[in-house]
């Protein structure tokens, strides 16, 4: 089945630093989504990408849909304490299925 | 406000009992999903439904059952056959394929077997 490799698993950074995380897949995806999950809550959609090469921003967040359609990255600029949480990538393949495949998440800790 | 609602937030179950988790959405979405989340793991798909009165097994359907009698509702039953049911359960919905495929999640239900 389709698999997503998300890295890094965890990050510890100082407030104000930039952050980068990425996901790679073993197969081509038509859609890449990035979510953030706070402890004990459901994931919240941050950015959705639909075209290879697409670069989309949402405030301090920027995500790109890789040209090969097998990868995506998420950057967070000038991190703040409320950026703490788990970030998940998710992708939808070409098979016409509605199913999303999720990465295992990147746990971000921001030290004030 | 439109959204997706899961209840209860916390649930305790005795071993051997079935329990049903509620999921309701008023987003007029066709597709609904149930995921299970364990510590350090990604989200694993239990069941999904693309249309009323139809649903498909996900990757870890054993020990679970669902129904989709109404567009707005997709309850999940955790049966006594599920060997390790303690987990965080997330319900999601999406409009469909392509743009608008984004899945929106509920707040989750934490199930603990005691």
Image (cartoon, coloured by chain):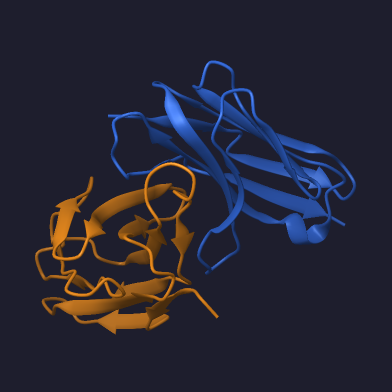
Chain colours: A blue, B orange
Horizontal relation, residue B15 to residue A57: left or right: left
| Vertical order, B83 against A91 (above or below) | below
Q: Which quadrant of the rendered structure holds the N terminus of chain A?
A: top left
| Side (left or right) of B34 relative to B60 | right
Q: Position of residue B10 (x, y in %)?
A: 40, 81
The answer to whether B62 appears left or right of A47 in the picture is left
Task: Examine the image and state in which quarter residue A72 appears.
Answer: top right
Residue at position x 81%, y 59% from top? Answer: A81
Q: Is residue A85 above or below residue A26?
A: below
In which quadrant will I find the C terminus of chain A?
bottom right
Is A16 left or right of B16, judged from the image as shown? Answer: right
Q: Is residue A26 above or below residue A110?
A: above
Q: Is residue B114 visible?
A: no
Residue B41 position, x and y percent, is 42, 47
The image shows residue A8, relative to residue A14, as above or below, that is above
Looking at this view, name the residue that lies furthest to the top.
Answer: A68
Identify the image quadrant of residue A11. top right
Q: Is residue A4 visible?
A: yes
Q: Nearer the viewer, residue B110 or A52?
A: A52
Q: Position of residue A76 (x, y in %)?
A: 77, 42
Name the residue located 34 percent from the left edge and 57 percent from the top edge. Answer: B35
How far across and how far down the image is residue A101, in percent? 39, 40
Q: Nearer the viewer, residue B84 or B49?
A: B49
* Number of numbered discs visible in the structure rendering: 0
- Residue at horizontal 90 percent and vertical 47 percent from the top: A16
């Amino acid at each position: 089945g389709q698999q997503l490799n998300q890295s890094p698993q965890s990050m510890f950074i100082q407030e104000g630093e930039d952050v980068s995380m990425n996901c790679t897949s073993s197969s081509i995806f038509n859609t890449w989504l990035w979510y953030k999950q706070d402890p004990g809550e459901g994931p919240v959609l941050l950015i959705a990408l639909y075209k290879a090469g697409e670069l989309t921003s949402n405030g301090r967040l920027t995500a790109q849909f890789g040209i090969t359609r097998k990868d995506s990255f998420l950057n967070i600029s000038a991190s703040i304490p409320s950026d703490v949480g788990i970030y998940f990538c998710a992708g939808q393949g070409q098979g016409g299925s509605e199913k999303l495949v999720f990465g295992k998440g990147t746990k971000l800790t921001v030290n004030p | 406000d439109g959204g997706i609602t899961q209840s209860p937030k916390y649930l305790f179950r005795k071993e051997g009992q079935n329990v049903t988790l509620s999921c309701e959405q008023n987003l007029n979405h066709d597709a609904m999903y149930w995921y299970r989340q364990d510590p350090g793991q990604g989200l694993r798909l239990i069941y999904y439904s693309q249309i009323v009165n139809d649903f498909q097994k996900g990757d870890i359907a054993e020990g679970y059952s669902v129904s989709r009698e109404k567009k707005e509702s997709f309850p999940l039953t955790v049966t006594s056959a599920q060997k390790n049911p303690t987990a965080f359960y997330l319900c999601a919905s999406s409009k469909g394929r392509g743009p608008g495929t984004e899945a929106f999640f509920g707040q989750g239900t934490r199930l603990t077997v005691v």
